[in-house]
Image (tube, rainbow, N blue to C red):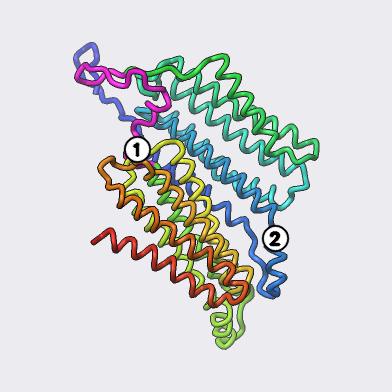
């Protein structure tokens, strides 16, 4: 509401809800970072145990491309996370710039699929690097628009800090552009082709522009806070509640656990009789249903443990965000491991694959908790040391249980699945003990 020169009040439309834009963006990033696993192709049911093993090993280019896509999307999410902590409002232009950015983030899994399927074709590398460069360029545009003249950014952010952030971000599209150009040589340049220019570019920006300046912020009561606080640390001040980190994690868990239902498929051809339908449901769908409930229970167990750990973690830092992102990477892989296991429930290779996938997921989750709780790094100082130590020991039960089941599966896949009761029991008993 503003007042004109004649004294008449005029109505000014409000800005968009910044929290809703953040939550929507986190959801889109979570979907994009999880859906890349859909590109994995499961082996046909007619293979032997040795054939399944051979097939899974030969699919390594898809796994590497998935890792690259996950790393790129995860990097952009963290950059987006930092940017939106600098903002205090969002207008219609900023909203649409963000939507355009998100549209290409969701599109990135397709170039990843092309790269995984045609790794020896330079065009696939060019396509992936170009898509990543475009996303990076759109991020720079959004950053420039938001910080220019403090259009959307907090007034306390110095102009010099905004300029350094823009130049740091501008290095990324140049790095991916170099990777796209080097891909035409026909060599395997996708990693070195953008990591080296990125590192050199960041070093050059640091040498020319210097470090980010400290920020001094004047509070409403006239006092001064934040003196000497680096710009990025100041920008993350609104993340002390872990709201965005937990929201993003919950979205990844939710989408991974929903992907499990995609393994329940109709027959490829129209069945001629009720007997044929009954046989199809018995032979094909029943194992998939069992696998679905197993996958749902395991991912649900990990989400429960993640929830339990973050009840005590009360703040975050860059290392925690990276460690949590690595854990979410392992969660996103579990639907594929579940699908392979439900397709071949009595074979060795699928059982070992699932055991190792679950062990890695639970081990990375334990790593998050160990990092946060050691020396009260990210937990309340009043938390008892003996309780934190006990919970750290408890967090090792689940990964050890799944890891032990992998060699057991070499002798008997059925017995290996019985061993999985150990990590379930360890995870659930820890929750009951804390509740007492």
Q: Residue at x 61, y 33 (%)?
A: 134
Q: Residues within 10 Å of mark 1 (few under 14, many from 20)?
A: some
Find residue 248 and report its horizontal and vertical position in percent: 42, 46
Position of the N terminus by quadrant:
top left
Q: Which residue range is magenta in the image?
A: 217-244
Residue topped by disc 2: 57
Task: Say if 294 sits above or below 100 in the image.
Answer: below
- Quarter of the rendering containing residue 391: bottom left
Contact between marks 1 and 2 (CB within 8 A): the answer is no
Task: Say if 225 sits above or below 28 in the image.
Answer: above
Instruction: State how many labels appear.
Output: 2
Kind of element beneath mark 1: helix
The reply to whether residue 137 is in sight is yes
Label 1 vs label 2, nearer the camera: 2
The reply to whether residue 289 is in sight is no
Q: Residue 19 carries which label?
A: 1
Q: How crowded is mark 2: few (under 14 residues within 10 Å), some or many (20 or more)?
A: few
Find residue 403 and report its horizontal and vertical position in percent: 53, 63
Position of the C terminus by quadrant:
bottom left
Q: Residue at x 25, y 60 (%)?
A: 435
């Amino acid at each position: 509401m503003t007042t004109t020169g004649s004294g008449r009040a005029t109505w000014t439309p409000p800005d968009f809800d910044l929290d809703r834009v953040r939550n929507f963006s986190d959801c889109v990033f979570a979907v994009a970072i999880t859906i890349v696993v859909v590109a994995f192709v499961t082996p046909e049911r007619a293979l032997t145990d040795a054939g399944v093993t051979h097939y899974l090993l030969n699919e390594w280019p898809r796994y590497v491309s998935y890792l690259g896509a996950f790393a790129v999307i995860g990097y952009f999410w963290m950059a987006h996370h930092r940017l939106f902590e600098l903002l205090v409002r969002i207008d219609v232009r900023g909203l649409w710039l963000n939507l355009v950015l998100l549209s290409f983030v969701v599109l990135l899994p397709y170039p990843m699929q092309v790269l995984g399927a045609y790794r020896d074709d330079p065009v696939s590398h060019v396509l992936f690097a170009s898509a990543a460069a475009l996303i990076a360029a759109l991020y720079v545009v959004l950053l420039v628009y938001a910080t220019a003249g403090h259009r959307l950014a907090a007034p306390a952010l110095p102009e010099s800090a905004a300029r350094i952030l823009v130049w740091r971000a501008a290095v990324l599209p140049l790095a991916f552009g170099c990777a796209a150009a080097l891909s035409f040589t026909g060599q395997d340049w996708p990693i070195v082709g953008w990591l080296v220019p990125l590192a050199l570019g960041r070093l050059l920006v640091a040498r020319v522009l210097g470090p980010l300046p400290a920020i001094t912020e004047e509070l409403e009561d006239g006092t001064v806070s934040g003196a000497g606080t680096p710009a990025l640390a100041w920008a993350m001040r609104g993340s002390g509640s872990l709201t965005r980190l937990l929201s993003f994690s919950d979205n990844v868990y939710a989408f991974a656990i929903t992907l499990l239902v995609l393994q329940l498929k109709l027959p490829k051809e129209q069945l001629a009789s009720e007997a044929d339908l009954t046989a199809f449901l018995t032979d094909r769908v029943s194992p998939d249903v069992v696998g679905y409930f197993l996958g749902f229970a395991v991912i649900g167990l990990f989400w429960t443990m993640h929830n339990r750990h973050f009840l005590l973690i009360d703040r975050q830092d860059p290392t925690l965000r990276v460690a949590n992102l690595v854990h979410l990477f392992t969660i996103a892989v579990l639907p594929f491991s579940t699908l392979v296991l439900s397709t071949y429930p009595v074979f060795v290779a699928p059982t070992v694959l699932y055991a190792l996938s679950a062990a890695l997921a639970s081990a990375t989750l334990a790593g998050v908790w160990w990092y946060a709780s050691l020396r009260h790094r990210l937990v309340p100082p009043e938390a008892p040391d003996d309780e934190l130590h006990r919970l750290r020991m408890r967090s090792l039960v689940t990964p050890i249980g799944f890891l032990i089941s992998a060699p057991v599966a070499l002798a008997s896949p059925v017995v290996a699945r019985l061993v999985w009761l150990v990590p379930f029991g360890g995870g659930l008993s820890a929750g009951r003990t804390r509740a007492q």
